[in-house]
Image: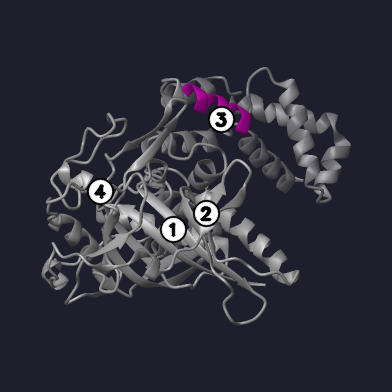
Amino acid sequence: MQPTIGLEIHVQLKTKTKMFCRCTLAPDGATPNAYTCPICWGYPGTLPFPNCEAIKMTVMLGTYLQGTIASHTKFDRKHYFYPDLPKGYQISQYNQPLVEGGSVPVLIEGHVRSFELERIHLEEDAGKLVHSQGGTIVDLNRAGIPLVEIVTKPVFHSPLEARAFLQGLRLIVRRLGISDADMEKGHLRCDANISVSGSDEHGVPVEIKNINSFAFVESALSYEIERQSKLVQAGKAIVKETRGFDEHKNITVSQRTKESAPDYRYFSEPDIPPFDAREFIEEKVKIALPTDEFTALKKDFPQCSSEELELLVNRSSSSKNDWVAVFRAASKRARAEGVLAWMLHRGIGVSLESATLAAFVEGVERLGISTREAQEIIAKIHSGEKVETLLGKHASELVSEDDLERGVRSVIQKNPQAWADLKAGKVRAQGYLIGQLSRTQKGKIDPRRVSEIIGILLKEE
């Protein structure tokens, strides 16, 4: 079965005021309806006036993604009736968007791929319904917030591709400074249109609405591909509908039949005249994309695996913290492979500043500290203790160089068979000898230095 996926992504723009009025954007936890005005409420006789900063941000994004900026664009009324939309319509864009075309380069499994866009347009958000035991209230603090909608062509064929695209897009809008793009706060929301077909032709598209995390996007699409595939294989019809994702059950559920453009009764917004969006083009902003970062990292750190560097870039894309910057700074003082291992696989991530991380990795490797002991040191660092103090204490407890060499020779004498096995090329025997040495010493030993001493003694034989 061949899945075909298209995405519609809504990104809340980082403006000071709403899209068609001068209400400021409500902070998290604000009193319901405290950031509203007659325009937000859709009172008769009120006139919307566009937020030029939002238009500039949308044009900036479109220019960066190499889309065509419209010489003639307009706003339209999109009609639907819902309690959180008091006007009975949303001001959006239909057939003349601000931006047409463009593409987003994305890093997937060590390769850079470019995914084509259909359009980028600008619209206002609706309010929201707040449900409680006492009933349901309408909160219009969100009503009128500027949203840029990025519509892709149906170019994705797996949930992995869709997730990677979203991660790459989020990093772009963050680095352009046009949105915080926090999915947890609803700043970035995704609708997915997916069809499954047993032939080269596209099947019946099903929409999944308002997916609010990267993991949920992948899970929802995976479930929907399986659901539709079973229907096609059983010879049953797929209904064109809108579905939601239940993250608790990890399934999609039917919500309503899918609307089409005629259902929304689009017509041009009479209170806002058409305009030339090219007037809002400013000098192109240069930012580092994930694809650029990956290429640069491969060049600067050839000793690190492509898979780990890609994972590092993707972690940076899906986090507020810049994992790449932390890695680069720490790798100036410590071995890059070690820094990468501790960041990606041993739980440190970006919880330590780069200087502390570098000192920790360098000290752990220099002193031969075991993973268990290193984890204890990390916990103490998080509790406020200095990394230098902790490493210094560990170093003071190490067996001296002379005692270490005497101990190695003594262990070899007491374990002639293990020594013979090691000389015969049985590498496991070395671990056995180091284990025996560890039991006989009162202080801590440096396994790396023990290995060096054993290597010297092997050459002497």
Asked whether residue 130 is drawn in magenta, I would say no
List the residue tagged with mark 1: 166
List the residue tagged with mark 4: 145
List the residue tagged with mark 2: 217
Closer to the chain start, of discs 4 and 2, is 4
Compute the Cα span from label 3 to label 2: 36 Å
Residue sitting at 53 percent across and 34 percent down? 364
Compute the Cα span from label 1 to label 4: 21 Å
Compute the Cα span from label 4 to label 2: 24 Å
Report the mark closest to the observer, 2 or 1: 2
Residue segment shown in magenta: 370-380
Residue closer to the observer: 360 or 418: 360
Compute the Cα span from label 2 to label 1: 9 Å
The chosen color scheme is: one colour
Q: Residues within 10 Å of mark 1 (few under 14, many from 20)?
A: many
- In this rendering, the answer to whether 377 lies above or below 212 is above
Q: Secondary structure at mark 2?
A: helix
